[in-house]
Amino acid sequence: MKGKIAFEEHMAIAETLEDTRSFAGDSGRWDDYVRQILDVGSERLETMDRTGIEYAIQSLNAPGVQGILDTREAIRVARKANDKLAEATIRHPRRFGAFAALPMQDPEAAAAELTRCVKELGFKGALVNGFTQKDVPDSAIYYDIPEYRPFWATVAELDVPFYLHPRMQIPAQARNYAGHPWLMSAPWGFAVETSIHALRLCGCGVFDDYPKLKIVIGHLGENIPFGLWRIDARMRFSRRGYRGKRPLGEYFLDNFVVTTSGNFNDPAFRCTLEVMGADKVFFSADYPFERMEDAADWYDATSVISEADRRKIGRENAIRLFKLNLD
Ligand code: GRE
Ligand code: ZN
């Protein structure tokens, strides 16, 4: 399919490049990662051309700004990354958009940076890599706590999506992964970490305060669509500490949308689609951690969807969500 839109597509700047090294692992791909993740120009555009991806919203790699302990440094790196993202969109406005990296260490600074990016630079929203560390390595701040309500007010006011992207749990808090580093990362731990964060947001009442908030999660919903029925079923018996006014599943269906990033699999796609509906599922690749070719070859050929839904999920839903003017 030509004209696809993708929006879990990553770049890096010098300060965050090393974050990616552990994911290159022993695959011998480090040199490719470096070249591909630093390039927001010709190689990326050529691969997009080849795979029928017309437009990509780019974002900083993980954990990026969320892994920086010093708040002033986090603010500096976020601005620098966003300025580089902006440059690419100015050079190729019909091919690239951008999601803001945000210094969540300081919710007020994060709201100010998002406002700058959206109002002055035309960004399409934010992409944040899970919880934020702050001051000490053994820290993990989640955004359901009351300190972030004014930040969420700004996101709602700007009316832009917030992409909650995975990061790895920090080793000091991850005794259940001890001895199994592979388990903490993209094969499983990313989804565990991100789904818990997403469910915390559902359970904190933020969607009662700001019902129009749109949160995006990748990888076909980080396993939540598969588990959604059981969450509400069990919460009939105990909802201790749950602060939402409505059943959790209603928030998930009203306030979340999901992408196909890095999960190019028919059975999982079928489940996600059936739970979410075709208006809330979006194509994405997760470049350069995934090959655009793998994302597109699967998506273009999957028989799970009709041709009309292929256009919707591959393109039209994103035009509507991000108010794009591509035609
Ligand atoms: C991602 O961005 O989703 C990602 C990484 C690193 C490894 C795998 C992966 O940041 O999917
Ligand atoms: Zn990603």
Image: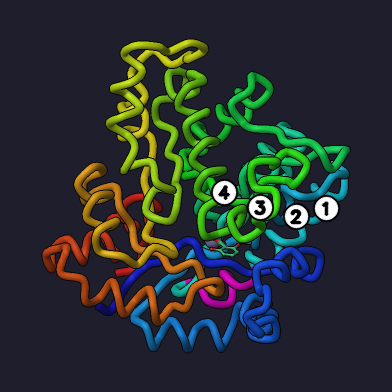
Q: Dot 1 corresponds to which residue?
A: 76
Range of residues picked out in magenta = 87-93
Q: For the point 32% across and 23% down, which residue is it? A: 232
**Which badge, 2 or 4, comes first in the chain's sequence?**
2
Q: Which of the numbered marks, if any, corresponds to residue 129?
A: none
Element at label 4: strand
Reply above or below: 161 against 99: above
Q: CA distance from mark 1 to mark 2?
A: 5 Å
Q: Which of the numbered marks, if any, corresponds to residue 126?
A: 4
Residue 165 horizontal side relative to residue 302, left or right: right
Image coordinates for residue 167, horizontal then vertical, percent:
63, 51
Image coordinates for residue 118, horizontal then vertical, percent:
57, 49
Q: CA distance from mark 1 to mark 4?
A: 16 Å
Q: Dot 2 corresponds to which residue?
A: 79
Reply above or below: 239 against 218: above
Q: CA distance from mark 2 to mark 4?
A: 13 Å
**Which badge, 3 or 4, comes first in the chain's sequence?**
3
Q: Tell me the amino acid under the disc marked 2.
A: Arg
**Which badge, 1 or 4, comes first in the chain's sequence?**
1
Q: Tell me the amino acid under the disc marked 3.
A: Ala
Element at label 1: helix
Q: Tell me the amino acid under the disc marked 1.
A: Arg
Reply above or below: 140 against 239: below
Q: CA distance from mark 1 to mark 3?
A: 11 Å
Do the residues bearing badges 3 and 4 touch, measured as CB atoms within 8 Å? yes
Q: Dot 3 corresponds to which residue?
A: 101
Q: Quarter for ligand 2?
A: bottom right
